Amino acid sequence: MHPRSTALRGTSVAALTALALTACGGSGVHGTPGADGLRDPYFPKLGNGGYDVAHYDLTLGYDPDAHRLTGTAEVTARATQDLSAFNLDLKGLDVKSVSVEGKDASFHRDGQELTIRPPDDLDQGETFRTTVRYSGDPETITDPDDSEEGWLRTKEGALALGEPTGSMAWFPSDNHPSDKASYDIRLTVPKGLKAISNGELTRESTKNGRTTFAWHSAEPMASYLATVAIGPYEVKKSTTKSGIPVLTAVEPSEAKDSAKALGRIPEIMEWQELNFGPYPFSSTGAIVAREGDAGYALETQTRPTFPGAPDTGLVVHELAHQWFGNSVTPKSWQDMWLNEGFATYAEWLWEEDHDGDSVQETFDQIYVGDYYEDKEDNDAIWAFPPAKPPSAANISDSPVYERGGMVIHKIRQAVGDETFYDIVQGWTKEHRHGNADTEDFTRYVEKHAGGDAAREKVRAIWGPWLYGDGKPERP
């Protein structure tokens, strides 16, 4: 084998690009390229190494008729190593220019990887600002499970949803849940349309037939939870009893059918704070798009998105995610059950506390196969263990949801109600605005189970219920 080929075998795209750029004139290089992926178990190319993002400042304009997006993304980050080059995730769209700390930077595109070579190496610990100017027709991305995300065209505008990979269809980012940041998102759209996003609306102004909406999210947010909804939305504002602002944006055709469930948001929030601890964000609400604009609801931060009018149970589920998934965010997509198991359990708890089936009755229905009308759906719950989905196509399957919720209930059975709620509220407090994985959770539960006997009971749960194949023995 040719010696040069041997030297380059297995070298990442980012490293090859940096080598090429250095050969073209870069001198005095002391850093190395950041990784062009974080090797997530299911999405190995998502995310990037070598830096940690602190803030995204996005200035976007969208023309629905031309389906054209223009954007300027300012990404403020801290280098976690000496960097000669680094990557951002961006799929499609045309990059016009890139600068780092105000100086023009070389860049290279390869699939979803935007590799950037700053004019000067970045030192470990250095905070730097990268500006990317881009435009084009934003893409709709098809997930491994065949659902659609990314930038979804609607009748009058668009809807941007990001779980698990779709955010890279509309802005460049470190697109992995392990790197959370604050956001400012400014959207300019034709007059008469609304542009809704996460956090709080800080400015709305109209000029030359176009309206700009500026949104601010101070608390850390994973890229997959950022959203944009553009359309003729009806916006209503209120507050919860504890003073949290509530903003709902509803597509007019869905307003009547949505009114009852959305009207219960303050009540749901009060109930969830009682059970899960203080609300982790500075505002809440909902976006209700037209039915068919998306194929699923999503827990977009502070403002869950629903494709059509939701029922109360679905609102409970998506708002519970603000604690489980949005504030306490998984370290990788393998830990998805920590999001969905808790949110599913929240639905069961709501039913229990509001004259519906007890959680134990729901648990028993699932175990004996009476939860769904279809036997195939009941059998699917046992297809794989919640903590070990077999592939990226399975991270949103029923074992992650229902069997994940059953794991939570087994913990409650093992430790009793008082200790259980202490564990839940302690967990959301200890990892507030952070990241955690399954091992962090099991370790936390064992530590706070309340004595050796209870600790042994919860340890006995992990094997058959969380990691084991097949249906566990009758509880």
Image: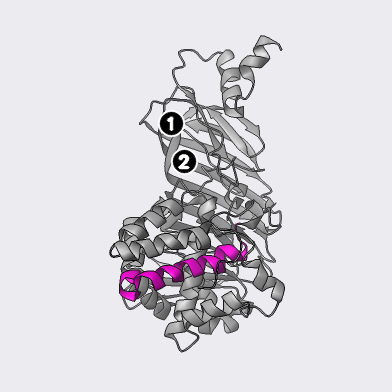
On the rendered structure, is 142 left or right of 335? Answer: right
Residue visible at 28% across and 65% down? 450
User: Please, is residue 187 above or below residue 32 in the view?
Assistant: below
Residue 295: image quadrant is bottom right
- Residue 149 appears at what percent x and percent y? 64, 56
Q: Is disc 2 placed on a helix, strand or loop? A: strand
Crowding at mark 1 (Cα within 10 Å: few <14, some 14-19, many 20+): some
Q: Residues within 10 Å of mark 2 (few under 14, many from 20)?
A: many
Mark 1 or 2, closer to the camera: 2
Vertical side of 78 occupied by 396: above or below: below
What residue is rendered at 40% in x and 81% in y? Answer: 267
| Relative to 22, 420 lies left or right | left
Across and down, in percent, residue 372 comes to 65, 78
Residue 191 visible in image: no
| Separation of marks 1 and 2 at Cα, in angstroms | 10 Å
Identify the image quadrant of residue 16: top right
Question: Residue 391: where, in percent of width, then height?
Answer: 64, 51
Residue at image point 43% right, 51% down: 439
Residue situated furthest bottom in the rendering: 355
| Frontmost residue, 136 versus 470 | 470
Can you give x and y, in whole percent of width and height, for residue 385 in the image? 57, 59
Residue drawn at 61 percent across, 28 percent down: 13
Quarter of the picture holding the N terminus = top right
Tell me the magenta residue range: 395-421
* Residue ID for mark 2: 75
- Magenta run includes residue 110: no
Which residue, given by chain and number where applicable, does mark 1 sit on?
A: 101
SS type, badge 1: loop
Lower sequence index among marks 1 and 2: 2
